[in-house]
Image (cartoon, grey):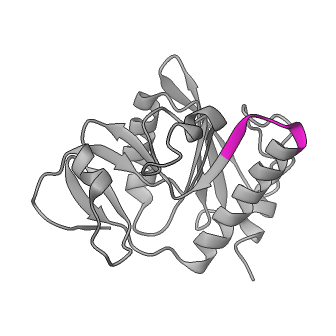
Amino acid sequence: MIQLSEKIYSFEDYCQYNDEADNHYELVDGRLVLMNPPTVRHFLLAKFLEMAFDQLIQRKALPLVCFREAGVRTGWRKSRLPDVFVTTKEAASELLDQSAIFQIPPLLIVEIVSPDSIKRDYRYKRSEYAALGVDEYWIVDPNKEKITIFLLEEGLYEEKVYNLSDKLVSRLFSELDLTVNQVLASGNM
């Protein structure tokens, strides 16, 4: 993560920003922050979870949609790029021809920890997502071989840590049948 400049951007400026280099930025307190390109393991983990959520959505014919690396506005001059998130089809249809930056809270967000995102994922995004009202927040941590699921209760997150053979329990997807091992194994070739 690299802070690009000292210039302060409004949320509207951020939505229109284009450096023509296909870089990805988060907006943090009005400043553009360049996101480092993810590792292949990171991409594989995100793809696996997106596919798992998509399968549950299709099987149950839920009015939901899953995105990878679309934006979520988390404050006045803040916008994040979660690795994976689930929202309603209604919310997605409102942005059909606009920048894919959601201003209403997704139902579930997943962040995959990389060496440069530990503090950002565990501290800053956790508090931003709770304040926004994201009901379920997952942190997939391949280095510590665990997944932490945070459930929003009265404005604060209650956390449950899942280790290797533990079966994940999701509030949104009660039929989810995955262990931490299965998720982490998807990051291998």
Q: Find out whether residue 96 is within the magenta segment.
A: no
Q: Is residue 137 visible?
A: no
Depth check, front residue: 20 or 155: 20
Q: Is residue 41 above or below residue 151?
A: below
Relative to 133, 25 lies left or right:
left
Percent position of residue 91, x then y? 56, 35
User: Could you tell me if residue 73 is visible in this image?
Assistant: yes
The vertical placement of 108 against 4, above or below, is: above
Q: Residue furthest bottom?
A: 189
- Decide which of 108, 161 is in the foreground and name it: 108
Location of the N terminus (image quadrant) = bottom left
Q: Position of residue 84 (x, y in %)?
A: 59, 53
- Counting from the top left corner in percent of width and height, residue 40 is at 60, 79
Q: Residue furthest top?
A: 154
Q: Is residue 63 magenta?
A: yes
What residue is drawn where x is 66% and y is 56%? Answer: 146
Q: Which residues are magenta?
A: 59-65
Point 72% across, 53% down: residue: 163
- The quadrant holding residue 33 is bottom left
Q: Quadrant of residue 73?
A: top left
Q: Is residue 76 left or right of residue 61?
A: left
How many marks the image carries: the answer is 0
Residue 82, above or below 188: above
